[in-house]
Amino acid sequence: MRLCWVLILKPMDSPQRGWRVGRIRTAAKAVIVEQGRILLNQCRDISGDWYALPGGGQEEEEALIDTLVRECEEEIGTSVEVQRLLFVREIVVVNHTFTYLEEAAHQVELLFECRLPAGYQPHCGPGADAAQIDVKWMDAAAMENARVYPRRIRELVDPMRWTELPVYWGDLE
């Protein structure tokens, strides 16, 4: 028996934003780990500081790798060398107590291993998101009591353990 998948594309509300599969947004995220620390965007809302991986939404006619390079230039002020795809995560907003999504009610995030240029010092890029206030290296101890999204990021500070994690994370906060 053969299975056939059909992809139905629907135009989005705004012509500047391209096409989506239904109402699902695609995003690319950078997993940058050095010396037991992970590079995260530091953001602030009315509840305080929170942290997330650099990266963001894919634009029309843009390859995911190009999305990730562009988003890192905007958010962390440098280009990255994109390595391999590591993990896939979904965010279905109605299932979460917290979300940083402004437009989409459902987002699929593809997490890629990335490398920084030599000598990079953390700083916000010229197109940082409105909530972003800084870029920080964080180790496991620093993340223990911090608001980190998704929470599983805490498990990424040791690349030797990545193979123990499932590739598909599902809809986790």
Image (spheres, grey):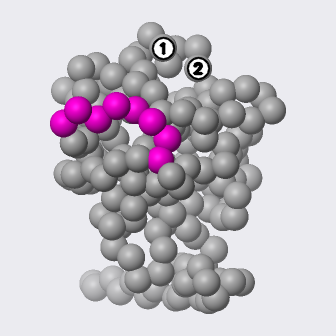
Crowd class of label 2 (few under 14; some 14 to 19; many from 20; radius 10 Å)? some
**171 to 64, vertically: above or below:** above
Residue visible at 62% across and 62% down?
106
The dot on residue 146 is 2
Residue 2, image x, y percentages: 28, 85
Q: Is residue 122 magenta?
A: yes
Q: Amino acid at mark 1?
A: Ala
For the point 24% across and 53% down, the residue is 82
Q: How many marks?
A: 2
**Between 12 and 1, the one nearer to me in the picture:** 12
Percent position of residue 6, x then y: 44, 87
| Pointer 1 with pointer 2, Cβ within 8 A | yes
Q: Secondary structure at mark 2?
A: loop
Residue 26 relative to residue 121: left or right: right
The C terminus lies in quadrant? top right
Picture quadrant where residue 169 is located: top left
Q: Of the residues shown, which amino acid type is indicated by label 2?
A: Ala
Residue drawn at x 51%, y 63% as measured from the top left = 57
The quadrant holding residue 116 is top left
Q: Is residue 53 left or right of residue 51?
A: left
Q: Which residues are magenta?
A: 118-125
Question: Which residue position is annotated with label 1?
Answer: 142
